[in-house]
Image (spheres, coloured by chain):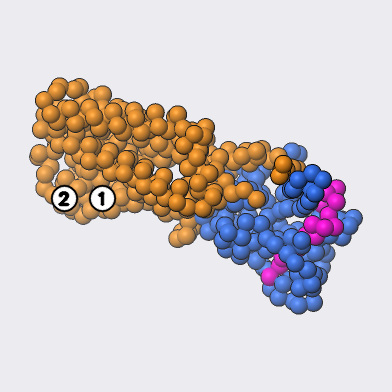
């Protein structure tokens, strides 16, 4: 099993509903976010190209955060989901320094926190909060090992990219372009 | 005009707009650990080579600094942790891929070894020292018997400690400035030179002082070579590492790096020590303090600048 997510940059309107859904679902402390929306604009006026991306932890296959964690608090759960075990985390900051996407943040309670792909929802057959709530249905989630899952189907059909693949982390958050 | 605009909705405290999770505690610890490693390596090396009587201060006196440096370093590391009550998790796990785990276990070995080494030489500081209990004398006798083994452990773990302070940072590919393997040898040589400078300050023996001025001179030359090598590597590398080098070549850290680390911390003490070895009389404390100061500033600047350097996407 290999969980992955694909975000359709052509359909995303940047409403940030996913951000709020994530914060509500996961009790993210005020002022922090586990996922966020990035807008980029390229080109020369009037030929401008806009890309909107809903970003979060990339749940990398070659995760620097799991590698450098001195206590094993950062670990792979089922399907390659990268999780932090709160009572093993000492808050040293190594994982935050190691993440090229800066996807982790220090929780005010001391441990390090990040996107979990809403593993508690996946386990009971629900989609992650961000994907479930998206009004344009631009977030696809599923198991890459299952050829019929939403994410496998859409990745086969559409062109996609990952963020800074040259960092060598093998990210599992895809962007449809 | 071709333009690129990026707007991010993220503003996490200590992460945005740029990483700012490691403050004074980490560079201070890297310095203290590196200097302690330098002191212990030099002491162990001269003891193993049987030069204890020629370099008495380096083998018997300067190591008394090491336990203090290590304990203060451990305290600063503890202060840095955000989930402090769980610090013991470091010692219930061995993670071979994590430099920080290596460091924690190395400290676990070298800190008690440094205490034992000092205890064996306590009479050099307090001539009337009495251990009071017979069993402590028995332990002392035991370690005196195996002092050479102890020295080897101290040497090997000293090198690991000195080099790990650099590897800790170089393991992070997310921060291009840190992601260079030269950082390990650079921090090791910088720690050794700070350790040699400590003996230069404490020694009252003229020939020992000359020897350590010579050692410091060689180490400063090596350090300078590593610094040049580091920049050559960056400038010949990918765009992100070129950007990282630019932090020091015109960027915000240019002045502090070249003035405090290279000029005040390496070139001037090297020149003073060179003059000292000639016929000029230079108070040994001046170049020694500059070397220690440069070693401290190197850690501070690399740790802070590294958090600024990043991948752009």
The tint of chain B in the picture is orange
User: Which of the two residues, A38 or A99, is positioned nearer the viewer here?
Assistant: A38
Give the extent of the magenta segment.
A2-19
**How many C-alpha atoms fall within 10 Å of the one at disc 1: few (<14), some, or many (≥20)?**
many
Identify the mark at residue B155; answer none if there is no mark: 1
Chain label for disc 2: B
Write the residue at 65% across / 39% down. Answer: B16
Instruction: Report x, y in % for residue B10.
Output: 72, 43
Place residue B215 in its image quadrant.
top left
- Horizontal side of B232 relative to A103 (left or right) equals left
| Quarter of the rendering occupied by the N terminus of chain B | top right
Whole-angstrom CA distance, mark 1 to mark 2, is 9 Å
Identify the mark at residue B56; answer none if there is no mark: none
User: Which of the two residues, B204 or A120, is positioned nearer the viewer here?
Assistant: B204
Q: Any idea which chain is the blue one in this picture? A: A
- Horizontal side of B39 relative to B28 (left or right) equals left
On screen, residue A24 above or below A176:
above
Q: Earlier in the sequence, mark 1 or mark 2?
A: 2
User: Which of the two residues, B31 or B242, is positioned nearer the viewer here?
Assistant: B242
């Amino acid at each position: 099993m290999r969980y992955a997510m694909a975000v359709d940059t052509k359909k995303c309107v940047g409403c940030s509903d996913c951000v709020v859904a994530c914060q509500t679902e996961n009790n993210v402390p005020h002022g922090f976010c586990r996922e966020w929306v990035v807008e980029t604009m390229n080109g020369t006026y009037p030929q401008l190209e806009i890309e909107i991306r809903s970003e979060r932890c990339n749940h990398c296959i070659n995760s620097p955060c799991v590698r450098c964690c001195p206590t094993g608090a950062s670990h792979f759960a089922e399907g390659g989901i990268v999780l932090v075990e709160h009572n093993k985390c000492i808050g040293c900051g190594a994982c935050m320094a190691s993440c090229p996407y800066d996807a982790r943040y220090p929780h005010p309670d001391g441990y390090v926190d990040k996107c979990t792909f809403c593993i508690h929802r996946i386990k009971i057959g629900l989609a992650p909060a961000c994907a479930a709530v998206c009004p344009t249905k631009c977030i696809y989630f599923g198991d890459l090992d299952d050829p019929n899952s939403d994410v496998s189907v859409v990745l086969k059909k559409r062109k996609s990219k990952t963020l800074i693949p040259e960092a060598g982390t093998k990210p599992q958050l895809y962007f449809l372009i | 005009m071709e333009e690129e605009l990026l707007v991010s909705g993220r503003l996490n405290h200590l992460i945005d707009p740029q990483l700012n999770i490691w403050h004074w505690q980490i560079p201070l610890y890297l310095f203290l650990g590196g200097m302690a490693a330098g002191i212990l390596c030099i002491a162990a090396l001269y003891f193993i080579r049987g030069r204890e009587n020629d370099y008495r201060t380096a083998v018997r006196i300067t190591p008394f600094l090491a336990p203090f440096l290590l304990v203060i370093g451990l305290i600063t590391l503890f202060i840095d942790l955000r989930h402090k009550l769980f610090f013991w998790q470091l010692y219930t796990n061995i993670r071979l891929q994590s430099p920080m785990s290596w460091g924690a276990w190395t400290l676990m070995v070298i800190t008690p070894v440094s205490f034992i080494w000092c205890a064996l030489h306590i009479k050099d500081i307090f001539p009337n020292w009495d251990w009071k209990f017979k069993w402590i004398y028995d332990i002392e006798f035991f370690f005196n018997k195996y002092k050479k083994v102890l020295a080897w452990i101290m040497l090997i773990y000293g090198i690991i400690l000195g080099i790990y302070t650099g590897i800790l940072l170089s393991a992070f590919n997310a921060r291009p400035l840190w992601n260079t393997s030269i950082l390990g040898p650079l921090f090791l040589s910088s720690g050794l030179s700070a350790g040699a400078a400590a003996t230069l300050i404490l020694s009252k023996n003229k020939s020992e002082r000359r020897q350590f001025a010579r050692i410091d001179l060689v180490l400063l030359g090596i350090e300078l070579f590593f610094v040049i090598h580091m920049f050559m590597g960056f400038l010949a590398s990918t765009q992100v590492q070129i950007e990282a080098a630019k932090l020091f070549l015109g960027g915000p850290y240019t002045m502090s790096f070249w003035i405090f680390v290279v000029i005040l911390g390496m070139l001037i003490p090297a020149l003073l020590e060179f003059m000292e070895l000639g016929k000029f009389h230079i108070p040994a404390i001046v170049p020694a303090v500059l070397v220690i100061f440069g070693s401290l500033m190197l850690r501070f600047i690399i740790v802070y600048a590294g958090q600024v350097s990043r991948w752009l996407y």
